[in-house]
Amino acid sequence: MVTSDHQQLLEHPVTTGDGVAGVERPRSLLEAVEADPTPLLDLAYRHVVSARLFDRPQVVQLCRLAADIETKPALLHLPLSGKIMISAFYEPSTRTRLSFESAWHRLGGDVISITDRSTTGIAKGESFSDVAEMFSNYGDVVVLRESSESAVYEMMRGLRIPIINAGNGVDEHPTQALSDIYALLKWNPSLADPTYRGGLRLGVIGLPARMRTVRSLLLLLAHFAHAFEEVVVVSPDNSVFSDGQREELQASGLRLSVTESLAATLPSLDIVYINSIAWVGESYERLTGDLKLSAASPLKPDAIVMHPLARGEELDTDLDDTPHNWYFAQARGAVFLRMALLASMTQRVSDIADLPRPDPATHS
Ligand code: CP
């Protein structure tokens, strides 16, 4: 039945354009960071399983390349024509699968997909290492999401093509973290400058122990520790960090604290990163309680809110039309960041961007 509300929607053409905070920012990042493709050379044909793969220059240059792509109306060349991505999602996804597939298509490649575990050999008991053998014959890169932490490692052993971890259980989601950093660098390009002492305070609402996006993000944030006064984890849980996690992050320079009180902490935060879903036991668990954000929350006027999405009731939709909303910018930028990563992994960077020639003296 067409209601009057539906009728109103039907009467208007679609508004083209972007409609999210941050779309105008890639140019600021381009201007703030000098192009240097040299760090990206080391990403050629590498497996991307953990955020630990990336050093600071690689993260910054990937984000700069993403900004370069984001500011272009279209690519002049389609460097991955004839190449195939295997998009293997044994667990649900909206953003990661579609943004990877969009990125590969935008580079000119073709995609073959698994979107339903029950239709694959894994459902019949086939091993991931056998599946890896087939993948090596059928495609040029694999993007894998799987509920177990170990499947990506089982596959890596036999693979003859690179694999990207698109979420392995509770462990990591490195390209989500790269997309998060891309959003942060667009918001404040000074973060890329290692001499910048921003004194920023970033709050993580959620559990670094059990949230893969947060686990990977904290590893990458450590490269930008110079800009942060503190990263505050807001959680009432007793086991906020997994074994050795806090020690690793602190050893890499990140100043960490933990608090239970969101209300007391929010007014001091410049960046609020909220997440709702954790892998607990054999299923997802939404962590809500009182840890919720809305337009009525005591946010700093210029604070930004980030969320890897999908959202639950912890993030009210009344924040969507406020300048605090940077979560849609995260999801949008993920396509360009993943294009930058895929171009680096397939050695096609020079086909899509005007960059200075890599310096052979600094590339071993
Ligand atoms: N951020 C993220 O991983 O979203 P999806 O689960 O939709 O891929």
Image (tube, helix red, strand yellow):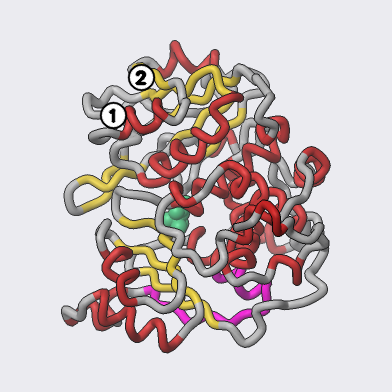
Ligand 1: give its quadrant.
bottom left
Which of the 4 quarters of the picture holds residue 197?
A: top right
x 41%, y 21%: residue: 256
x 31%, y 28%: residue: 289
- Res 309 seen here: yes
Nearest to the observer: residue 171 or residue 245: 245
Specify the amino acid type for callout 1: Val
x and y, in percent, of residue 97 in the image: 48, 65
Stretch of the chain drawn in magenta: 101-115
Query: Mark 1: few, some, or many residues within 10 Å (few <14, many ≥20)?
Result: some
Query: Mark 2: few, some, or many residues within 10 Å (few <14, many ≥20)?
Result: some
Query: Which residue carries the number 1 mark?
Result: 240
x 59%, y 22%: residue: 270
Magenta span includes 136: no
x 65%, y 60%: residue: 340
Determine the CA span between mark 1 and mark 2.
8 Å
- Res 6 seen here: no
Which of the 4 quarters of the picture holds residue 224?
A: top right
Relative horizontal placement of residue 97, taking residue 21 as reference (left or right): left
x and y, in percent, of residue 93 in the image: 42, 61
Relative horizontal placement of residue 359, taking residue 216 as reference (left or right): right
**Judging from the image, what secondary structure is the residue with disc 1 in?**
loop
Q: Which mark is residue 258?
A: 2
Specify the farthest residue to the top.
264
Q: Is residue 262 above or below residue 6?
A: above
**Looking at mark 1, is its residue's CB closer than 8 Å to ligand 1?**
no
